[in-house]
Amino acid sequence: MTNPIYIDALGPNGPYRARNRLTVSDVAGDPLVELSLVPKLFVSRAMSALRKADTLPLEERLAALAKAGELFATGVVDGMSAADYQYTVSRMSGTPLPIVREAVQAIARSAADAYRSAQQARPVGAVNDWRDPNARRGTATWIRRGDVFAVHAAGNHPGVHSLWLEAIALGYRVAVRPSRREPLTPYRLISALRASGFGDDQIVLLPTDYAAADEILRQADLSMVYGGQEVIDKYAADPTVLPNGPGRSKILVTADSDWRDHIDMIVDSISHQGGTACVNTTAVFVEGDPTPVAEAIAERLSAIPSLPPEDDKAVLTAYSLEAAKKIEGYLLAKAAGTTAHLGGDGVVDELADGSAVLRPAVHQLDDPFAEQAGVELAFPCVWVAPWTREAGTAVFKDTLVLTAVTKDERLLDDLLADPTIKNLYIGDHPTYWMAPGVPHDAYLGEFLMRTKAVIRD
């Protein structure tokens, strides 16, 4: 490896370059980064230091957060410019460069707005401080459920690192275990936070092997983890862990609405930012004949170009050829027995450097309850199915976002009442829509905070 990029652990006493290092390659298989992997003892000492550390006063930490967001997005951090960082992330993770740029700006906005966004979760009857005048007659105060928050981060999109900034804003000390696929974003963000006023013992980066990873969660008060369905199942019964897994987001178009008026929104929901996010549409349900809808989606998606991730016009995420073929094999096995409108013969498109993108796939199902409708893959892959009133709302269970294009208010009431449908967008709104202060999968503050009664003289 020539001139590797070293991503050190960021411990409570500063950067630490471990003897045990993992080589992270770019999508073409060329070595790019050496990631330090710290042992369990290092993790234990770092978590202990977080527990003993002080929390910055509110005004200081909010100023430091805003400063860090700006430095992260535009400045030189640990000798790397913003442009070099964005290019490196694109080559490392395969995320198209335009998407990386958008995510960087979103992280900077989240840093500046983290406290206000977190406050949206505070109950209207609660105050933030016992010194509030309302405490003289008795009130609820909003307090942290602990002091140390841990994150097992995902590497599919840089934007996942915008959410845990709310924990920093609320006064938590934070430990982040980065993804091996893309550890540069959290390294740069935590370095920027430290350079802007946060102590080394207040935010740490702990790259580890799997054996030490659980130690981070064990020593934290609360944790957030990302992963597949196995992660959801593993932590489902643990009240101290907030799992983030597949979104299985969906669109429903009922017979009282013309799908042609919404085809732009439907296609955009499938392909936006490369189709890799939990808020991208996995399945489209149509009351009536789904065939013309599937054909129209396939026609639009087929026009997306295959480009290397660092291209300014790239849309599709790149993978190593081996990884791309593995995903393709899984898709083709799952799609057996369905009607392929796009991608039926395969989706791998090899690029000149030996990496590959996954071309969009559109498959039509005969049954709204077909298991394929819940298969979520990290590229523009959609299942189009018929929907009937008899099928009802049961087909939409365990959905992160459901866009319902319908005028049926009773149906909308039923969809809103279903607690397994996390977000309901009514009408021509893409499933990826998000806004500051609006919950993604409930408010993170609902998990991080609780109320305590206070009355004072």
Image (cartoon, helix red, strand yellow):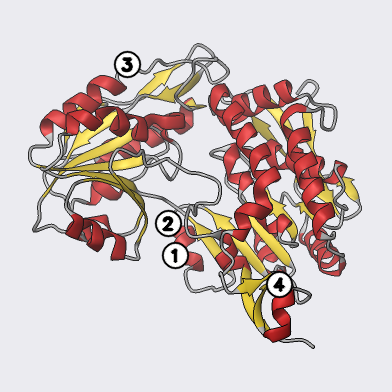
Which of discs 3 and 4 lies nearer the camera? The answer is 4
**Could you give the CA–CA distance between mark 3 and mark 4, rounded to whole angstroms?**
50 Å
Picture coordinates of residue 12 (x, y %)? 87, 55
Compare residues 197 and 50 and report the one nearer the observer: 197
Amino acid carrying mark 2 in the image:
Gln
Three-letter code for the amino acid on which mark 3 is drawn: Ala
Q: Earlier in the sequence, mark 3 or mark 1?
A: 1
Image location (x, y in percent) of residue 234: 49, 66
Disc nearer the start of the sequence (2/4) = 4
Residue 172 bears which disc, if any? none
- Residue at the spot of label 4: 146
- Please name the residue shown 78% across and 56% down the image: 39
> Gap in Å between the C-alphas at discs 2 and 3?
32 Å
Camera-nearest residue between 117 and 182: 117
Mark 2: which secondary structure? helix
Image spot of residue 345 (x, y percent): 25, 25
Q: Quadrant of residue 342?
A: top left
Q: Which residue is mark 1?
A: 233
Mark 2 in CB contact with mark 3 (< 8 angstroms):
no
Pointers 1 and 2 in contact (C-beta within 8 Å): yes
Secondary structure of the residue carrying tag 1 is helix
> Callout 4, which amino acid?
Gly
Cα–Cα gap, marks 4 and 1: 24 Å
Q: Are marks 3 and 4 in contact (CB under 8 Å)?
A: no
**Label 3 to label 1, Cα distance in Å?**
38 Å
Q: Quote the CA–CA distance across marks 2 and 4.
A: 27 Å
Compared to 234, does 38 lie above or below? above
Comparing 235 with 301, the one in front is 301
Q: Is residue 166 left or right of residue 41?
A: left
Whichever of labels 2 and 3 marks the residue nearer the N terminus, that label is 2
Q: What residue is shown with label 2? A: 229
Give the spatial CA distance, label 1 vs label 2: 6 Å
